[in-house]
């Protein structure tokens, strides 16, 4: 039913998000990884995807196949196709908040992305954090704390049950781990929860294999 095209596991934060979402549905899928930052990367992507970028989800229905691209669009499509997975909160106000902070992650936080680039399987020194990066961290952790406080003991994730909001912020969890960003205890517990997910650990195993097999350029 599904074919998910993703990029290099150590680097492709956008690929991780729909990967976690499709794992949460329990639906079987074929996964194809395209190596990024190589001379032939663009040609490989163009050969496999209509969007000229990863990730892309191909959906097969009978004899028809169509593509969904963009991480958030893929997550939305999976939520529609698998309502039983509960990828958005049931409560309208919680759902609106989850969508809002997911969209904020999708469109914002460029300073954090640039300074704390995703190196999923690596542990690196904390770089100098300027005011804009610190502001991004404060905004993100504020979203997390507000969501966690509003759960009222119902579930462990941002909105109780695992949702697209958790998918969207999982790469940030990995960045905080890679660069040793210290967090208050409740937020660190949330990060540990996300990091320990079987899907995250499977992604980590693949990312570690990329490092071990020499598939990545040295970290800078």
Image (cartoon, helix red, strand yellow):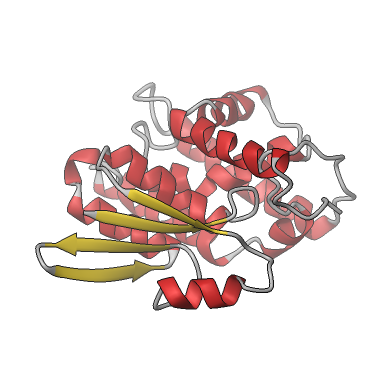
Q: Which of 147 and 56 is in front in this view?
A: 56
State the image coordinates of residue 14 (x, y, percent, origin top left).
Answer: 53, 58
Asked if 8 appears above or below 87 in the picture, the reply is below
The quarter in which the N terminus is drawn is bottom left
> Is residue 212 in view?
yes
State the image coordinates of residue 128 (x, y, percent, origin top left).
Answer: 90, 50
Tag count? 0
| In the displayed structure image, the side of residue 85 where residue 138 appears, left or right | right
Q: Which of 62 and 103 is in front in this view?
A: 62
Asked if 31 appears above or below 37 in the picture, the reply is above
Asked if 84 appears above or below 132 in the picture, the reply is above
> Is residue 97 in view?
no
State the image coordinates of residue 162 (x, y, percent, origin top left).
Answer: 37, 36
Name the residue: 19% across, 62% down: 60
Name the residue: 73% across, 52% down: 216
Name the residue: 36% across, 64% down: 73
| In the displayed structure image, the side of residue 193 where residue 181 appears, left or right | right
When asked about the image quadrant of residue 186, the answer is top right
The quarter in which the C terminus is drawn is bottom right
When asked about the image quadrant of residue 42, the answer is bottom right
Residue lying farthest to the right in this orientation: 128
State the image coordinates of residue 98 (x, y, percent, origin top left).
Answer: 39, 49
Name the residue: 82% across, 40% down: 124
């Amino acid at each position: 039913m599904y074919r998910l095209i993703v990029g290099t596991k150590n680097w492709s934060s956008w690929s991780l998000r729909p990967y976690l979402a499709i794992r949460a549905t329990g639906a079987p899928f074929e996964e194809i990884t395209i190596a990024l930052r190589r001379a032939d990367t663009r040609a490989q992507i163009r050969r496999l995807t209509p969007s000229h970028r990863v990730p892309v989800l191909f959906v097969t229905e009978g004899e028809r196949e169509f593509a969904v691209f963009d991480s958030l669009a893929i997550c939305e499509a999976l939520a529609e196709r698998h309502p039983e997975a509960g990828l958005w909160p049931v409560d309208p106000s919680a759902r609106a908040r989850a969508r809002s902070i997911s969209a904020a992650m999708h469109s914002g936080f460029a300073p954090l992305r640039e300074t704390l680039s995703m190196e999923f399987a690596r542990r690196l020194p904390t770089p100098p954090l300027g005011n804009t990066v610190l502001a991004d961290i404060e905004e993100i952790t504020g979203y997390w704390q507000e969501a966690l406080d509003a759960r009222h003991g119902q579930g462990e994730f941002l909105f109780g049950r695992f949702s697209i909001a958790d998918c969207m912020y999982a790469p940030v969890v990995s960045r905080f781990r890679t660069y040793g960003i210290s967090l208050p205890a409740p937020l660190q517990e949330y990060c540990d929860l996300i990091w320990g997910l079987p899907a995250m650990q499977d992604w980590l195993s693949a990312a570690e294999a990329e490092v071990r097999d020499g598939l990545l350029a040295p970290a800078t």
